[in-house]
Image (cartoon, coloured by chain):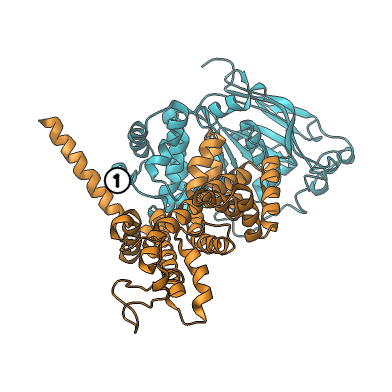
Amino acid sequence: MSDTPLLDVRGLTTHYVSARGTRVTRAVEDVSFTLRDGETLGIVGESGSGKTTLALSLLRLLPPGARIIAGAIRFEGEDLLAKRESEMRHIRGKRIAMILQDPMASLNPLFTIGDQVGEPLRVHEGASRRGAWERARELLGAVRISAPNARVRNYPHELSGGMRQRIVGAIAISCGPRLLIADEPTTSLDVTIQAQYLSLLRELQRAQGLALIFITHNLGIVARMCDKVAVMYGGRIVESGPVRRIFGAPAHPYTRALIESIPKLGDSNGRLTAIEGQPPDPAALPEGCAFHPRCPVRLEKCATERPRDSVVGDEHRTACWLHG
Amino acid sequence: MNGSRAAALTVAWRLASFRSRLEGLPAFPIVILGTLALLAIFADFIAPHDPQVGLLGERFRPPAWQAGGSTAHLLGTDHVGRDVLSRLIFGARISMTVGFTAVIFAGVVGTTLGILAGYLGGWVDQVIMRVTDAWLALPALTFAIFLAAIVGPSASNIVIIMALVYWTRYARVVRGEVLSLKERDYVRLAIVAGCSKRTIMKRHILPNVVNSSIVLATLMLGVVIVTEAALSFLGVGVPPPQPAWGLMLADGKKGLMAGYWWLTVLPGLCIMLMVLSANLLGDWLRVKLDPQLRQL
């Protein structure tokens, strides 16, 4: 494996600007991370912490009004922010694939499975309809759908939720991407299917050697799936590092609080600890550290000065005055 | 040998799949529209009389089964002695062509513009929808008269006028539908998968709005035919000696109070059957195009 990481994000900043330019929402602020081939990065955070905006920024698919203000995104050594829209189109779906929040609704009701799994192949590789169907059969096999020859002819409504889920997975890997971004892909599934789907994703990842960015608010999934974790709060990464370090020795009070709020089996005496207060309004983030109004161990300067990013261990960084 | 067998098999398979596609085709509208189409095509051979020439001595003959009727004019004659049956048969030609082509023209234009406005948004949407608003503010009939006065009355001009007047209805409905469709996850997935806007509009938006367009088209067919009748009545539609159902209906109105019912009821019945058939056919098509309904 070469030294240059697959994905290198530096100081990425994305803002939503209202129509008159009066209201600025800092959805993603100065985010940096790297991802190597085959690695899995979990991005964790509450609603409104900027997870999804971050994912969309990587693909440059921001809604109108959102703009990448600063930073750099290098993918396989290429600067994605310098690319033209038509060049980005050749990257989306071919080299970077994405699975959306609700894969159940991600299939067009009017087309057969074969057509939909084959669509990226036809768009990106100019495959014929017949060739695309042929590949679609193989892909359905790869995501462990039984009787792929019959399934390609089915319509989405004829399949169960779990199967549709797998088909969305098959669409994502159809062009052999290097990076797969999964934006809360399991929130709409029930727990048993969730587990199946996660192991399928891991399997695909291993078989194809692809890097995975897993966006979720479920720490349990992160512990199971990921090599590295980045915890987001108020648009910034407040802590990042290898999974073991984060769960074993969380450095940021927010991470600690998140881990404490996971219900544990067999722990019947203690009540669940919730994090006090509300997540901040991304349009009006507090001064200093965004977490300070809710922080149980805040210092005086937390309210006025933003903490610097500091190294607390091997590849383990946090932005907190307790460690600064 | 082997090749020809394979070819024969392919042909057989194609036929079988074509037949399965026609499955459940409702008989009534097919029979009605088929008959009307045949009458329209072979009007020259079927019609017993010249539809444009009448004998003044034969004015207001009632249909054959009424007192005073004769078998020479099965459905009677009109105010200048022209054979009503022949005029209905030739009228099918004009009314069907005008009706269907106008509806399809308007549908294609309106649906295309509606998709562009809804999907692209921004200034494209603004331009198209403001034009549509202005268009809809004009009373359809007045607008049609205005256009007819400019281009002059003829059957082919009527088609263009109707398309120009009625495309806005489609654009409105389709745009609304597209606005909700483009927020669906499968459209988002197509964007994420790197499809171009054109591909998305063609493969993901269009097939999903075509249903609404078809339903609207079957409704518009009736409106178009009645508008055509009104234009003819006002003298800016299909020019008078030619037989069009709408025109016959309008002409016949004068005789209604005098008891010459066949002059209005018969063309009215033809219009009704055609519109009803188109509606039923549209309904069948709507079900056929939706894979979820198709299996029920």
Q: Amino acid at mark 1?
A: Ala
Q: Residue furthest top?
A: A2
In the displayed structure, does residue A183 sit left or right of residue A54? left
Q: Position of residue A27 (x, y in %)?
A: 74, 40
- In terms of depth relative to the viewer, which is nearer, A47 or A272? A47
Q: Residue furthest front?
A: B57
Is there any visible trace of residue A50 in the rendered image?
no
Quarter of the figure with residue B49: bottom left
Q: Residue at x 66, y 33 (%)?
A: A57
Identify the chain of the residue marked 1, using the numbered disc in the image. Answer: A
- In terms of depth relative to the viewer, which is nearer, B219 or A96? B219
Q: Position of residue A130 (x, y in %)?
A: 33, 34
Q: Residue at x 43, y 71 (%)?
A: B78
Colour of chain A, in one word, is cyan
Colour of chain B, in one word, is orange
Residue A186, placed above or below residue A81: below
Q: Position of residue B171 (x, y in %)?
A: 59, 51
Q: Residue furthest left?
A: B1
